Amino acid sequence: MKEVQLTGGAAEWVERCLSYGSTLARLLLDSPISGGHIWTYLPADVDVHEASRSEILKHGKKDAITAGHVEEISDMVAGFVTRHLRRSGKPYAVLEDISRPGDPAISSPDEQLFFYHSEVYDFLGPKDRDIDIRTVRWWLSKGRPYPTVLVLTAAADIPDICHQQEVPRSVLKAFAQDAAHILVGAYDEEGYLIWSKSV
């Protein structure tokens, strides 16, 4: 498995995924995708040019990401999210959810959620610094819209977010403005493209 820098249709794919998303995803469209680089985790033998083509990003390809690599990719992405949460400051991982406020599926007190109008977002935050990779991997596999949109951000200027809190638009704007990484589903949701802000 290797980290691969992508070109070609990768930026267009990230923008397309964000355009399908909820409010946070659409706010992320204001971030210049050109102000960062796009990469992914892929098996070592995958052709990078082929992996950057739009139709491959959407549907995958039988020999591009096989079932034998999906678990390894999931572990690597979960490790990436875990490392982000261990940063100093107020790191957050925010994942769009397919649920709506009041759905029985989100009534568990073990899940951290916040709401913006009728939208539900799962989140991990500063209190989750000691979370393990296995738990993050489970968190990433929860019910989510297609395509997946996950934001790794740090928003020092917002108050701590509580479970099932209704947040104002300003919180979503802060998350979008301070986004360090945007992860979107790719390869028929067997992998992710990761946009990382240039430093």
Image (tube, helix red, strand yellow):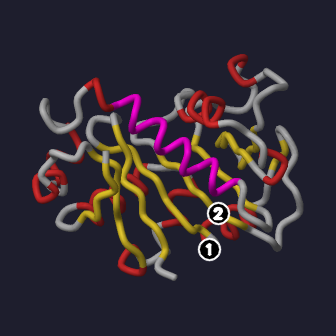
Mark 1 closeness class: few <14, some 14–19, many ≥20 residues within 10 Å: some
The first of marks 2 and 1 along the sequence is 2
Q: Distance from label 2 to label 1 (Cα)?
A: 9 Å
Tell me: residue 185, above or below residue 72.
below
x then y, percent, for residue 78: 54, 41
Compare residues 6 and 57 and report the one nearer the observer: 6
On-image quarter of the N terminus:
top left
Residue behind mark 2: 153
Residue behind mark 1: 177
| Amino acid at circle 2 | Thr
Q: Residue at x 66, y 30 (%)?
A: 135
| Amino acid at circle 1 | Gln
Q: Secondary structure at mark 2?
A: strand
Compare residues 36 and 15 and report the one nearer the observer: 36
x then y, percent, for residue 24: 58, 57
Query: In the image, is 57 to the left or to the right of 193?
Result: left
Magenta residue span: 70-85
Tell me: residue 47, above or below residue 73.
below
Q: Name the image quarter holding residue 59.
A: top left
